[in-house]
Amino acid sequence: MNRKDFIKKTGLGAAAVVGATAGLRAKNVRLKHSDYDKMMKQVGFNHIPNNEMKTTNTVLHRASTRGHANHGWLDSHHSFSFANYYNPERMNFGVLRVLNDDKVSPGMGFGTHPHDNMEIISIPLKGDLEHKDSMGNTAVIKEGDIQVMSAGTGVYHSEYNKNKDQNVEFLQIWVFPNKRDVQPRYDQMPINSVKTKNEFYQVLSPNKTDQGVWVHQNAWFSMSEVDPGKTLSYTVHSEQNGIYVFLLEGQVEIEKNILNPRDGFGVWNKASIEIKSAKASRILLMEVPMNIG
Protein backbone atom coordinates (compact mmCIF):
# COMPACT_ATOMS: atom_id res chain seq x y z
CA MET A 1 0.00 0.00 0.00
CA ASN A 2 1.51 3.38 -0.98
CA ARG A 3 1.22 6.51 1.14
CA LYS A 4 -1.62 7.99 -0.92
CA ASP A 5 -3.74 4.85 -0.59
CA PHE A 6 -2.97 4.59 3.15
CA ILE A 7 -4.08 8.16 3.82
CA LYS A 8 -7.27 7.61 1.82
CA LYS A 9 -8.03 4.37 3.69
CA THR A 10 -7.27 5.58 7.22
CA GLY A 11 -8.19 9.24 7.00
CA LEU A 12 -4.84 10.23 8.51
CA GLY A 13 -4.93 13.89 9.37
CA ALA A 14 -8.64 13.79 10.22
CA ALA A 15 -10.10 10.69 11.89
CA ALA A 16 -6.88 8.87 12.73
CA VAL A 17 -5.08 12.03 13.84
CA VAL A 18 -7.16 14.13 16.21
CA GLY A 19 -6.63 17.42 18.04
CA ALA A 20 -3.86 17.53 20.63
CA THR A 21 -3.99 19.12 24.07
CA ALA A 22 -4.39 22.90 24.28
CA GLY A 23 -0.84 23.30 25.54
CA LEU A 24 0.50 22.07 22.21
CA ARG A 25 -1.49 24.30 19.89
CA ALA A 26 1.06 26.99 18.96
CA LYS A 27 0.70 27.31 15.19
CA ASN A 28 3.70 29.45 14.28
CA VAL A 29 6.63 28.42 16.43
CA ARG A 30 9.86 30.37 16.02
CA LEU A 31 12.84 29.07 17.99
CA LYS A 32 15.67 31.21 19.27
CA HIS A 33 18.19 28.38 19.03
CA SER A 34 17.88 26.45 15.79
CA ASP A 35 18.27 22.66 15.71
CA TYR A 36 19.76 23.03 12.25
CA ASP A 37 22.42 25.53 13.32
CA LYS A 38 23.24 23.62 16.51
CA MET A 39 23.61 20.31 14.68
CA MET A 40 25.64 21.88 11.86
CA LYS A 41 28.43 22.88 14.22
CA GLN A 42 31.61 20.94 13.41
CA VAL A 43 29.72 19.01 10.75
CA GLY A 44 30.65 18.69 7.12
CA PHE A 45 31.54 16.13 4.53
CA ASN A 46 34.63 15.00 6.39
CA HIS A 47 35.02 11.47 7.66
CA ILE A 48 38.00 11.80 9.97
CA PRO A 49 40.20 8.68 9.81
CA ASN A 50 39.97 6.50 12.88
CA ASN A 51 40.62 2.90 13.85
CA GLU A 52 37.24 1.83 12.51
CA MET A 53 37.98 3.16 9.01
CA LYS A 54 38.54 0.33 6.53
CA THR A 55 39.07 2.15 3.23
CA THR A 56 38.91 5.71 1.92
CA ASN A 57 35.19 5.41 1.19
CA THR A 58 33.77 3.25 3.98
CA VAL A 59 33.26 3.56 7.71
CA LEU A 60 32.38 0.85 10.22
CA HIS A 61 30.71 1.70 13.53
CA ARG A 62 30.56 -1.23 15.93
CA ALA A 63 27.59 -1.32 18.29
CA SER A 64 29.90 -1.31 21.31
CA THR A 65 31.51 1.99 20.23
CA ARG A 66 28.28 3.99 20.23
CA GLY A 67 27.59 6.68 22.77
CA HIS A 68 25.42 5.49 25.67
CA ALA A 69 23.23 7.22 28.22
CA ASN A 70 21.03 5.47 30.80
CA HIS A 71 18.68 7.84 32.59
CA GLY A 72 16.68 5.07 34.27
CA TRP A 73 13.47 5.72 32.34
CA LEU A 74 15.47 6.12 29.08
CA ASP A 75 18.26 3.86 27.84
CA SER A 76 19.72 5.36 24.68
CA HIS A 77 22.57 4.47 22.31
CA HIS A 78 23.88 7.10 19.88
CA SER A 79 25.52 6.15 16.60
CA PHE A 80 26.48 9.82 16.13
CA SER A 81 27.30 12.62 18.57
CA PHE A 82 24.19 13.63 20.48
CA ALA A 83 23.37 15.35 23.78
CA ASN A 84 26.20 14.57 26.26
CA TYR A 85 27.92 12.19 23.83
CA TYR A 86 30.44 14.07 21.71
CA ASN A 87 32.95 12.45 19.37
CA PRO A 88 34.44 14.60 16.57
CA GLU A 89 34.95 11.43 14.52
CA ARG A 90 31.26 10.54 14.80
CA MET A 91 29.33 13.69 13.89
CA ASN A 92 27.31 12.58 10.89
CA PHE A 93 27.17 10.51 7.73
CA GLY A 94 26.39 13.07 5.06
CA VAL A 95 22.99 14.55 5.93
CA LEU A 96 22.30 11.71 8.39
CA ARG A 97 22.95 13.52 11.66
CA VAL A 98 21.27 11.46 14.42
CA LEU A 99 20.64 7.74 14.80
CA ASN A 100 19.42 6.99 18.32
CA ASP A 101 18.44 3.51 19.49
CA ASP A 102 16.09 4.19 22.42
CA LYS A 103 14.29 2.18 25.10
CA VAL A 104 11.69 4.02 27.18
CA SER A 105 10.16 2.61 30.38
CA PRO A 106 6.39 2.02 30.69
CA GLY A 107 4.39 5.23 30.92
CA MET A 108 7.51 7.41 30.62
CA GLY A 109 8.69 9.64 27.79
CA PHE A 110 9.90 12.95 26.42
CA GLY A 111 7.92 15.98 27.58
CA THR A 112 6.95 18.83 25.29
CA HIS A 113 10.05 20.22 23.55
CA PRO A 114 10.81 22.20 20.37
CA HIS A 115 12.45 21.38 17.03
CA ASP A 116 13.01 23.26 13.80
CA ASN A 117 14.52 22.69 10.37
CA MET A 118 15.08 18.97 10.73
CA GLU A 119 13.47 15.87 9.22
CA ILE A 120 12.76 13.59 12.20
CA ILE A 121 11.92 9.94 11.54
CA SER A 122 10.77 7.46 14.20
CA ILE A 123 10.58 3.68 13.70
CA PRO A 124 9.16 1.68 16.65
CA LEU A 125 10.77 -1.75 16.99
CA LYS A 126 8.70 -2.90 19.97
CA GLY A 127 5.68 -1.44 21.73
CA ASP A 128 3.69 1.74 21.09
CA LEU A 129 4.82 5.38 21.10
CA GLU A 130 2.30 8.18 21.67
CA HIS A 131 2.94 11.45 19.82
CA LYS A 132 1.38 14.90 20.35
CA ASP A 133 2.43 18.14 18.66
CA SER A 134 1.67 21.84 18.21
CA MET A 135 0.21 21.18 14.74
CA GLY A 136 -2.79 19.61 16.46
CA ASN A 137 -1.79 15.98 15.88
CA THR A 138 -1.99 13.15 18.36
CA ALA A 139 -1.33 9.59 17.26
CA VAL A 140 0.03 6.25 18.42
CA ILE A 141 2.98 4.92 16.43
CA LYS A 142 3.08 1.15 16.69
CA GLU A 143 5.65 -1.53 15.99
CA GLY A 144 5.58 -1.92 12.22
CA ASP A 145 4.91 1.81 11.58
CA ILE A 146 7.14 4.63 10.39
CA GLN A 147 6.59 8.28 11.34
CA VAL A 148 8.08 11.47 9.90
CA MET A 149 7.89 15.01 11.22
CA SER A 150 9.24 17.90 9.15
CA ALA A 151 9.99 20.44 11.86
CA GLY A 152 10.46 23.30 9.38
CA THR A 153 9.77 26.76 10.84
CA GLY A 154 9.27 25.22 14.28
CA VAL A 155 7.13 22.73 16.15
CA TYR A 156 6.66 21.49 19.72
CA HIS A 157 5.97 17.83 20.41
CA SER A 158 6.02 15.13 23.07
CA GLU A 159 6.60 11.36 22.90
CA TYR A 160 5.55 8.84 25.54
CA ASN A 161 5.48 5.08 25.96
CA LYS A 162 1.80 4.28 25.51
CA ASN A 163 2.21 0.92 27.27
CA LYS A 164 2.02 0.44 31.04
CA ASP A 165 3.56 -3.04 31.09
CA GLN A 166 6.51 -3.02 28.65
CA ASN A 167 9.28 -0.85 27.27
CA VAL A 168 8.86 0.86 23.94
CA GLU A 169 11.92 0.47 21.72
CA PHE A 170 12.38 2.73 18.73
CA LEU A 171 14.86 4.38 16.40
CA GLN A 172 14.87 8.15 16.16
CA ILE A 173 16.67 9.46 13.09
CA TRP A 174 17.41 13.09 12.20
CA VAL A 175 18.21 14.14 8.64
CA PHE A 176 19.24 17.65 7.57
CA PRO A 177 16.60 18.98 5.13
CA ASN A 178 17.36 20.40 1.69
CA LYS A 179 14.90 23.25 2.31
CA ARG A 180 14.81 25.45 5.40
CA ASP A 181 11.75 27.04 7.01
CA VAL A 182 9.17 24.83 5.34
CA GLN A 183 5.66 24.49 6.74
CA PRO A 184 5.83 21.88 9.57
CA ARG A 185 4.14 18.59 8.70
CA TYR A 186 3.43 15.15 10.17
CA ASP A 187 2.89 11.78 8.53
CA GLN A 188 2.93 8.08 9.40
CA MET A 189 2.08 4.75 7.80
CA PRO A 190 2.43 1.02 8.51
CA ILE A 191 5.63 -0.52 7.17
CA ASN A 192 3.99 -3.95 7.30
CA SER A 193 1.71 -2.89 4.46
CA VAL A 194 4.68 -2.78 2.05
CA LYS A 195 6.86 -5.52 3.55
CA THR A 196 8.35 -8.13 1.21
CA LYS A 197 10.62 -11.03 2.16
CA ASN A 198 14.27 -11.33 1.02
CA GLU A 199 14.37 -8.02 -0.81
CA PHE A 200 14.49 -4.34 0.08
CA TYR A 201 11.19 -2.55 0.43
CA GLN A 202 11.13 1.25 0.44
CA VAL A 203 9.74 3.04 3.49
CA LEU A 204 10.86 6.65 2.82
CA SER A 205 11.73 8.80 -0.19
CA PRO A 206 11.78 12.44 -1.40
CA ASN A 207 8.60 11.87 -3.42
CA LYS A 208 5.10 12.47 -2.08
CA THR A 209 3.51 9.79 -4.25
CA ASP A 210 6.14 7.06 -3.69
CA GLN A 211 5.83 4.07 -1.42
CA GLY A 212 6.35 5.01 2.23
CA VAL A 213 6.55 8.43 3.88
CA TRP A 214 8.42 11.37 2.32
CA VAL A 215 10.95 13.98 3.50
CA HIS A 216 12.45 17.27 2.35
CA GLN A 217 15.70 15.61 1.28
CA ASN A 218 17.02 13.51 -1.59
CA ALA A 219 17.05 10.42 0.66
CA TRP A 220 15.64 6.91 0.42
CA PHE A 221 15.22 4.47 3.34
CA SER A 222 14.61 0.76 2.80
CA MET A 223 14.24 -2.24 5.08
CA SER A 224 14.50 -5.99 4.64
CA GLU A 225 13.97 -9.26 6.49
CA VAL A 226 16.44 -11.73 5.01
CA ASP A 227 16.79 -15.50 5.31
CA PRO A 228 20.23 -17.08 5.92
CA GLY A 229 22.27 -17.56 2.77
CA LYS A 230 20.49 -14.87 0.75
CA THR A 231 22.25 -12.00 -1.04
CA LEU A 232 20.63 -8.61 -1.55
CA SER A 233 21.72 -5.94 -4.03
CA TYR A 234 21.06 -2.23 -3.72
CA THR A 235 21.69 0.49 -6.33
CA VAL A 236 21.81 4.15 -5.32
CA HIS A 237 19.33 6.60 -6.81
CA SER A 238 21.91 9.40 -7.07
CA GLU A 239 25.68 9.37 -7.48
CA GLN A 240 25.82 12.16 -4.88
CA ASN A 241 24.50 9.76 -2.25
CA GLY A 242 26.08 7.29 0.13
CA ILE A 243 24.60 4.28 1.90
CA TYR A 244 24.48 3.71 5.65
CA VAL A 245 23.37 0.23 6.77
CA PHE A 246 22.18 -0.32 10.35
CA LEU A 247 21.75 -3.97 11.26
CA LEU A 248 18.81 -4.54 13.59
CA GLU A 249 19.06 -8.33 13.93
CA GLY A 250 21.18 -11.21 12.61
CA GLN A 251 24.52 -11.16 10.82
CA VAL A 252 25.48 -9.92 7.35
CA GLU A 253 28.58 -9.30 5.27
CA ILE A 254 29.13 -6.03 3.37
CA GLU A 255 32.33 -5.17 1.51
CA LYS A 256 34.15 -7.99 3.37
CA ASN A 257 32.99 -6.64 6.75
CA ILE A 258 30.89 -8.79 9.08
CA LEU A 259 28.10 -6.85 10.80
CA ASN A 260 26.35 -7.97 13.98
CA PRO A 261 23.25 -6.47 15.63
CA ARG A 262 23.34 -2.67 15.96
CA ASP A 263 26.55 -2.32 13.94
CA GLY A 264 26.52 0.47 11.35
CA PHE A 265 28.36 0.51 8.04
CA GLY A 266 28.63 3.43 5.62
CA VAL A 267 29.90 3.50 2.05
CA TRP A 268 30.04 6.27 -0.56
CA ASN A 269 31.32 6.77 -4.11
CA LYS A 270 29.80 3.42 -5.09
CA ALA A 271 26.88 2.86 -7.45
CA SER A 272 25.73 -0.33 -5.74
CA ILE A 273 26.47 -2.78 -2.93
CA GLU A 274 25.76 -6.41 -2.11
CA ILE A 275 24.73 -7.64 1.33
CA LYS A 276 25.12 -11.34 2.17
CA SER A 277 23.08 -12.72 5.05
CA ALA A 278 24.80 -15.30 7.29
CA LYS A 279 21.83 -15.53 9.69
CA ALA A 280 18.18 -14.53 9.60
CA SER A 281 18.61 -10.75 9.56
CA ARG A 282 16.67 -7.51 9.71
CA ILE A 283 18.23 -4.51 7.98
CA LEU A 284 17.65 -0.76 7.78
CA LEU A 285 19.38 0.86 4.80
CA MET A 286 19.57 4.65 4.52
CA GLU A 287 20.64 6.27 1.25
CA VAL A 288 21.48 9.94 1.87
CA PRO A 289 23.32 12.82 0.18
CA MET A 290 26.91 13.09 1.31
CA ASN A 291 27.06 16.87 0.94
CA ILE A 292 25.08 19.13 3.24
CA GLY A 293 23.47 22.24 1.84
Image (cartoon, rainbow, N blue to C red):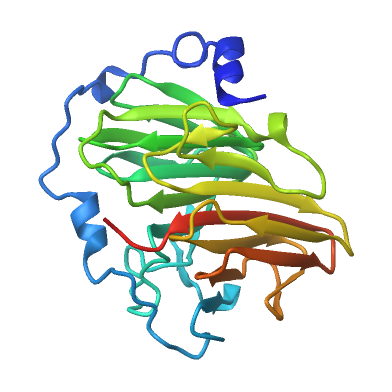
The image shows a total of numbered marks equal to 0
> Which sits in the foreground, 285 or 78?
285
Residue in view at x 62 percent, y 47 percent: 222
Residue 72 showing in the rendered view: no
How far across and down, in percent of the image, does residue 216 sit? 36, 40
Up/down of 238 relative to 263, above or below: above
Give the quadrant of the C terminus.
bottom left
> Which sits in the foreground, 238 or 263?
238
Residue in view at x 18 percent, y 49 percent: 34
Residue in view at x 70 percent, y 33 percent: 194
Give the quadrant of the N terminus.
top right
Residue 64 showing in the rendered view: yes
How far across and down, in percent of the image, does residue 271 sit? 58, 64
How far across and down, in percent of the image, does residue 91 sit? 36, 70
> Which sits in the foreground, 213 or 32?
213
Up/down of 128 relative to 260, above or below: above
Residue in view at x 59 percent, y 72 percent: 63
Task: Report the side of 35 relative to 192 (left or right).
Answer: left
